Image (cartoon, rainbow, N blue to C red):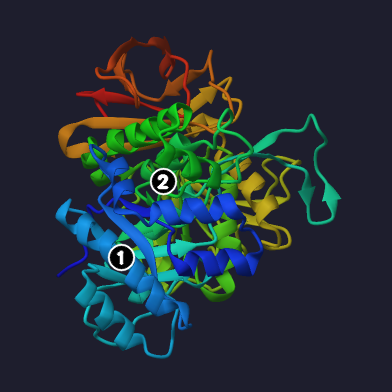
């Protein structure tokens, strides 16, 4: 029995362990108890018929007296689900008696178990490791691994920076996304599948449901996978066949199916004009990961290069490289970075370790960086090192500048974008995500290639929409249709 990268996972909270958890958090009432009981009934599995969801995550053992009752209560659900082709993953929190809990799960028909932290032994079932976001053991991740402490995709207000108010009620909104972390996982755990664990906000009514389609798109567009999770109001209404709830469920499944129909997109390579180089670990983790988060909000197109992989990483197409870590590069790494700079690239570093005797100048008085001419390129060094990721992100954006954009949005509001490429088949794919609570209209997308014909694909449409661009030197502009949560522009056969 092996882990299956094609599993589409969903949390299926039910049984005595869920009741105990809710009692402990004091979030349970009579209606919620009825909901928990309903989701433990095999008949509720009928909701999955015709959907791509094929893997359910159930609580299996917490190391307490409720474990036996939980496992007994799940038995009918597992028996019926397995006949329907559904795989079950049992989440185990127990430390004592772990092997026994796993063996019991194997006998009951679990396909795998979900365990916190690295798994150092061989067990009776395959293990999916679960980590907090800031404690992922990248070198030892299982073929499928889960990460917690993620955000619900949406928008917020850029109100505070440390203790300083940055914006008021009319200030610029910022995007909450897990996309940068999915890209990081793709680089640090290549060939493995990242499951993102996050729950929707509580919904006061079904009239304003959580943005489930965006939660799917924010994960899938960046090659991650969301562990589907429903809010309590929706979970209570679905077993009763509530029409409004069934409509929300249908839209969610439609979004999941859309990305399942385009699984080949996961093989595309992310395009970037900036390479962010770090080991992303230890003392370097905060600065490097927060920088990724912040430049994503600024629509900077970047690639991630793990520091140890720099020598083998291609630099073709890059306009700039930022070396985030305080550690000085090795002699070989210095040589590669020096070559990149001398050939016309921009190198951004926390301290100067370029050639001796070069006098710096100020490129822009508003950017507190000393800039050194090295060959045909430049080396930019802050006056006081990298102290604050917020400042580093803004400075980096200014140094790289919009003139090097591969893609750009006009009238974007609260949107984001990602450009991927399949060079071998001459395809380019631009993901466009709308993080606001309402649809986005009158949005124009700029691409840096001369493609005057493209196709728009999005969930809910059976056939792509052909879209014509207009010349906008040196590239092309496309007026996008109204975007609910997500759409993608596909360009084919162009000189990419």
Q: In the rendering, at what x and y percent does residue 474 appear?
A: 42, 19
> Counting other residues with Cα less than 10 Å from the Cα at mark 2, is it few (<14), some (14-19), or many (20 or more)?
many
Asked if 336 appears above or below 127 in the picture, the reply is: above
Q: In the rendering, at what x and y percent does residue 192 appear?
A: 28, 62
* The C terminus - image quarter: top left
Cβ atoms under marks 2 and 1 closer than 8 Å: no
Res 52 quadrant in image: top left
Residue at mark 1: 89
Q: Nearer the viewer, residue 102 or 322?
A: 102
Res 105 quadrant in image: bottom left
388 lies left or right of 307? right
Q: In the rendering, at what x and y percent does residue 359 appear?
A: 65, 55
Image point (51%, 36%), residue name: 211
Image point (40%, 44%), residue name: 318
> Counting other residues with Cα less than 10 Å from the Cα at mark 1, is it few (<14), some (14-19), or many (20 or more)?
many
Residue at mark 2: 219
Mark 2 residue element: helix
Q: In the rendering, at what x and y percent does residue 473 appear?
A: 44, 16
Q: Nearer the viewer, residue 24 or 203?
A: 24
Q: Nearer the viewer, residue 343 or 134?
A: 134
Mark 1 residue element: strand
Asked if 252 appears above or below 274 in the picture, the reply is: above
Q: Nearer the viewer, residue 311 or 141?
A: 141
235 lies left or right of 349? left
| Of labels 2 and 1, the one closer to you | 1
Image point (36%, 34%), residue name: 255
Q: Report if residue 178 is visible in the image.
A: yes
* The N terminus - image quarter: bottom left
Res 491 quadrant in image: top left
90 lies left or right of 334? left
Label 2 – label 1 distance at C-alpha: 20 Å
């Amino acid at each position: 029995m092996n882990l299956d990268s094609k599993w589409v996972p969903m949390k299926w909270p039910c049984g005595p362990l869920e009741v105990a958890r809710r009692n402990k958090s004091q979030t349970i009432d009579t209606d919620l108890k009825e909901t928990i009981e309903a989701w433990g009934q095999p008949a509720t599995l009928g909701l999955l018929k015709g959907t791509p969801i094929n893997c359910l995550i159930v609580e299996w053992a917490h190391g307490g007296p409720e474990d036996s009752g939980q496992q007994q209560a799940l038995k009918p659900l597992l028996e019926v689900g397995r006949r329907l082709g559904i795989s079950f993953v049992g989440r185990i929190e127990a430390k004592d008696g772990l092997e026994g809990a796993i063996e019991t799960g194997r006998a009951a028909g679990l396909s795998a178990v979900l365990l916190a932290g690295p798994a150092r032994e061989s067990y009776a079932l395959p293990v999916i490791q679960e980590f907090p976001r800031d404690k992922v053991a990248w070198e030892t991740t299982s073929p499928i691994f889960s990460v917690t402490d993620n955000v619900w995709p949406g928008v917020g207000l850029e109100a505070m920076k440390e203790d300083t108010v940055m914006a008021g009620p009319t200030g610029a909104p910022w995007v909450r996304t897990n996309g940068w972390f999915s890209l990081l996982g793709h680089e640090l755990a290549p060939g493995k599948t990242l499951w993102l664990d996050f729950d929707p906000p509580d919904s006061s009514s079904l009239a304003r449901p959580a943005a489930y389609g965006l939660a799917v798109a924010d994960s899938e567009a960046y090659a991650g996978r969301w562990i589907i999770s429903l809010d309590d109001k929706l979970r209570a209404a679905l077993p009763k066949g509530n029409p409004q709830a069934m409509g929300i469920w249908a839209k969610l499944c439609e979004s999941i199916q859309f990305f399942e129909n385009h699984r080949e997109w996961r093989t595309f390579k992310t395009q970037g004009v900036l390479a962010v180089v770090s080991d992303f670990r230890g003392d370097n983790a905060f600065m490097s990961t927060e920088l990724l988060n912040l430049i994503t909000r600024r629509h900077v197109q970047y690639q991630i290069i793990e520091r140890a992989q720099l020598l083998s990483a291609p630099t073709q197409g890059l306009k700039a490289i930022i070396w985030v870590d305080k550690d000085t590069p090795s002699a070989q790494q210095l040589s590669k970075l020096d070559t990149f700079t001398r050939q016309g690239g921009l190198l951004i570093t926390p301290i100067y370790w370029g050639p001796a005797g070069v006098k710096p100048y100020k490129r822009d008085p508003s950017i507190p960086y000393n800039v050194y001419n090295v060959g045909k390129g430049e080396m930019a060094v802050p006056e006081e090192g990298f102290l604050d990721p917020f400042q580093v992100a803004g400075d980096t954006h200014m140094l790289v500048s919009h003139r090097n954009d591969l893609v750009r949005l006009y009238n974007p509001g609260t949107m984001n974008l990602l450009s991927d490429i399949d060079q071998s088949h001459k395809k380019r794919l631009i993901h466009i995500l709308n993080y606001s609570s309402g649809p986005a209209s009158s949005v124009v997308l700029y691409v840096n290639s001369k493609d005057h014909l493209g196709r728009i694909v999005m969930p809910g449409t059976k056939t792509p929409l052909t879209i014509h661009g207009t010349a906008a030197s040196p590239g092309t502009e496309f007026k996008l249709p109204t975007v609910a949560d997500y759409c993608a522009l596909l360009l084919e056969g162009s000189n990419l």
